[in-house]
Amino acid sequence: MRNAIRDLAGASGAARLDGPMHVLADLGGPLPAGIALAAAALFATVRRRSAYPIAIAAGGVLVVTIAVIAGKDLIGRPGPSEAPVPADGWGFFPSGHTATSTVCYGIAALLLGRVGSARAGRRWALGAVVLCALIGFALLWCDYHWLADVLASWALCGIVLWAAARVADAGGLRARPPAAPPSPSPRGTPPSSAR
């Protein structure tokens, strides 16, 4: 798959997509993803009047950061350029940008979905999935990572997001049920439009 994406990136006329793909890849960095998560956690904290959303966000980021750094350090695999990893450097497996974007945008969507309706929660989740898929695609397009780097980060973050959802449920951060439809007017009382 990575080779197919690289072939597509090298095709004539595809060069105009390089700029947007680099922007997408940069959205996986700690600054934009961290800001999005901090804003969502703060909003959820204010709406729920509880510090629980901040604890979920911080816990998820901490677990993923430790796992990614440990993986990069232990495995030490070179990136697509095949340049050797320096002795004091980290490898490319798993992808840090993929992990950062997935855990930050994923937990942000989870928290925002828990302060609104279940329908809004599904929309936030879908938006996070699409954005993270685009970031992973962009990392391959720009030749920053191998496909396995991206897939490993998604797998790791899938586990962390599942755990974050369970912790949110246990802490009472559940999505609000949909509003009940208006009750019909009692019999014998004509609707207001017929008066």
Image: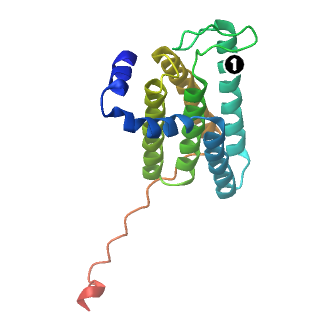
At horizontal 67% and vertical 32% (from top left) the residue drawn is 61
| The residue positioned farthest toward the bottom in the image shown | 195
Q: Is residue 80 left or right of residue 40?
A: left
The amino acid type, in three-letter code, at marker 1 is Ile
Residue 33 screen position, x and y as percent: 61, 40
| The residue positioned farthest toward the left in the image shown | 194
Q: Which is more toward the observer, 151 or 137?
A: 137
The image quadrant of residue 63 is top right
Residue 87 screen position, x and y as percent: 74, 7
Residue 157 screen position, x and y as percent: 56, 26
At horizontal 68% and vertical 15% (from top left) the residue drawn is 90
At horizontal 37% and vertical 16% (from top left) the residue drawn is 3
Identify the coloring.
rainbow
**Crowding near the residue tagged with mark 1, few <14, some 14–19, many ≥20 C-alpha atoms within 10 Å:** some
Question: Dot 1 corresponds to which residue?
Answer: 69
Q: Which is more toward the observer, 95 or 154?
A: 95
Quadrant holding the N terminus: top left
Residue 60 screen position, x and y as percent: 66, 32
Quadrant holding the C terminus: bottom left
Number of numbered discs overlaid on the protein picture: 1
Q: Is residue 97 left or right of residue 38?
A: left
Q: Give SS at disc 1.
A: helix
Vertical relation: 88 (above or below) 99? above
Q: Which is more toward the observer, 101 or 79?
A: 79
Q: Which is more toward the observer, 27 or 64?
A: 27
